Amino acid sequence: MSNRTDDARKRAQTARQILTVAQMRAAEQGLMDAGHDVHALMQRAGRGAGEWVRRLAAGRSVTVLCGPGNNGGDGYVIAQYLADHDVPVCVVAARPPQTDAARRARSLFAGEVREAGAALSQEGLPRGGVLVDCLFGSGLSRPLSDDLAALLGDLAAHHAMRVAVDLPSGVDADTGALLNEGLPEWTLTLALGAWKPAHFMMPACVTMGAVRLVDIGVEAMPGAAQVLARPVIAAPAPDAHKYRRGLLGIVAGAMPGATLLSAQAALRGGAGYVRLLTGGEAPSGVPAELVVSRGALPDLLADGRYGALLVGPGLGRDDAARAKLDVALASGLPLVIDADALVLLQPGLAGVNGLATRACVLTPHEGEMQVLEHNFGLSGEGDRPARAVALARASGAHVLLKGPCSVIAAPDGSVTMGSRASSWLSVAGSGDVLAGTVASRLAVTRDAGAAAAQALWLHSRAAERAGSAFTSGELAHAIGGALAEVLA
Ligand SMILES: NC(=O)C1=CN([C@@H]2O[C@H](COP(=O)(O)OP(=O)(O)OC[C@H]3O[C@@H](n4cnc5c(N)ncnc54)[C@H](OP(=O)(O)O)[C@@H]3O)[C@@H](O)[C@H]2O)[C@H](O)CC1
Ligand SMILES: [K+]
């Protein structure tokens, strides 16, 4: 029983790993060393993908476009699987197979193959229900030539649904770059064996439609990035009280709107008690549930019961803001640093060296990220996961790099990638809601990695629950419902 549970946990973990082309090759080698051969892996991958296509086709005809490599080989296996299940299928061979495994897969396909090229007229190109793209996968090394791009575009335009196998042809697996202009949009993309970075990176990920993983038994690779998991959040303990549940302090600044928005989210993110820490008058519009503590920040923080602090939303960038950031850094408390505070953060500030010894999350968007990279003397080179890792290593904090595909990097170099989030999140105040949610989870968990991951998921789910054209206030209100979905 426990072995079975262990196995299930292991498979769930490997189902979340994201492998670069080099890591995928190493994983494939691992399977070879364990006695599998490419033919067997291709059969497994092709049949798994074929089952998805069979269901999607629901009796309609299928065209499989096959390229020269093993992605093309998968295509012949898919075609044979469909034929075996009485689905009308035709293969278009864009190039003859070039690998042993692909040649063997083709030889085992008993159905019709039309060779692309001058002899195949426009009229000879099949039209039908579902196009399956097995032109290129992770082995794509350059843009598609004009003839291949035209063939792919023509077939895509003449099929109602389009399935990309492993990756859409024309997509760079490691970076998510589109190597050609005008590439088709896909209904479904089936990742084979493991996710690739492109499945979670712009601009490729928005062309892929729904994405699903086909398991072929790839083992866990050390150091692999992980897909953001749906969290499991425990309800408060039976004997919990507001302080034990988590007291969060939110440092108020010059612009109360952003601070209050982050507080609205924090109140719904699980913390037992949220206090607005202000040196002056309470801003207008403070909800009754938000306790306002007035006084000098060092005095207010002398209360030893804080679980976490949030500094940044609405803070401003003047000397008063700088002084508050200094106090927050000096407090040694678990910390979320967002917005203006990110721009003020400098490696030379007292307390910055201590970020590695406490739970701390930085939540920059792209513009703030560039300022941080400049301030921390980082090159800013590489893709977003690599840049987030560089900042996490340099600062000692977890970095939640926001965007359509957000990335979380830990100071130890580990990376978690979020799935594409609702484009309605591009609304003013959305970042304040995220920061408040991270801070709330940090006050509860005191764990920067867990808080960032839970909050990113909750924020994305809250957007789905809020629907379309929501305000950031409505988004903050939806955090509670998202949390209720993932209670243990
Ligand atoms: N990794 C696994 O465990 C499994 C992977 N499977 C599938 O295999 C592909 C990767 O297969 P691979 O053969 O490495 O790559 P591709 O099929 O994508 O194609 C590579 C060949 O295409 C040539 N190439 C690359 N770019 C172009 C281009 N723009 N135009 C023309 N030709 C191109 C390349 O030649 P080079 O000139 O670059 O040397 C190769 O000949 C993976 O995506 C999965 O679908 C298995 O089936 C299961 C196990
Ligand atoms: K493909």
Image (cartoon, rainbow, N blue to C red):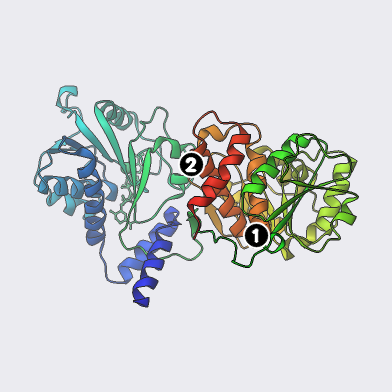
Q: In the image, is residue 419 above or below residue 120?
A: below
Judge by depth and name the residue closer to the eye, 21 or 160. Answer: 160
Position of 77 relative to 34 (above/below): above
- Secondary structure at numbered mark 2: loop
| Image position, residue 220 (x, y; %) | 42, 65
Can the viewer see residue 410 in this picture? no
Question: x%, y% of residue 391?
Answer: 67, 52
Res. 444 mark: 1
Residue 344 x/y as whole percent: 80, 44
**Residue depicted at 44% across the width and 56% down the height:** 19
The earlier-in-sequence mark between 1 and 2 is 2
Specify the quadrant of the image occupied by residue 10. Answer: bottom left
Q: In which quarter of the image is residue 218?
A: bottom left
Above or below residue 436? Residue 430 is above
Q: What element carries label 1?
A: helix
Give the side of residue 291 with respect to residue 124, left or right. Answer: right
Asked if labels 2 and 1 touch by Cβ distance under 8 angstroms, the answer is no
- Label 2: how many Cα within 10 Å (few below 14, some 14–19, many 20+): some
Number of residues whose C-alpha sits closer than 10 Å to that of mark 1, classed few (under 14), some (14–19) or many (20 or more):
many
Amino acid type, callout 1:
Val
At which x and y percent is residue 336?
71, 52
Q: Which amino acid does label 2 sit on?
A: Arg
Q: Find disc 2 in the rendering and name its residue.
A: 420
| Residue found 24% across the figure and 49% down from its top | 74
Measured Cα–Cα span from mark 1 to mark 2: 27 Å
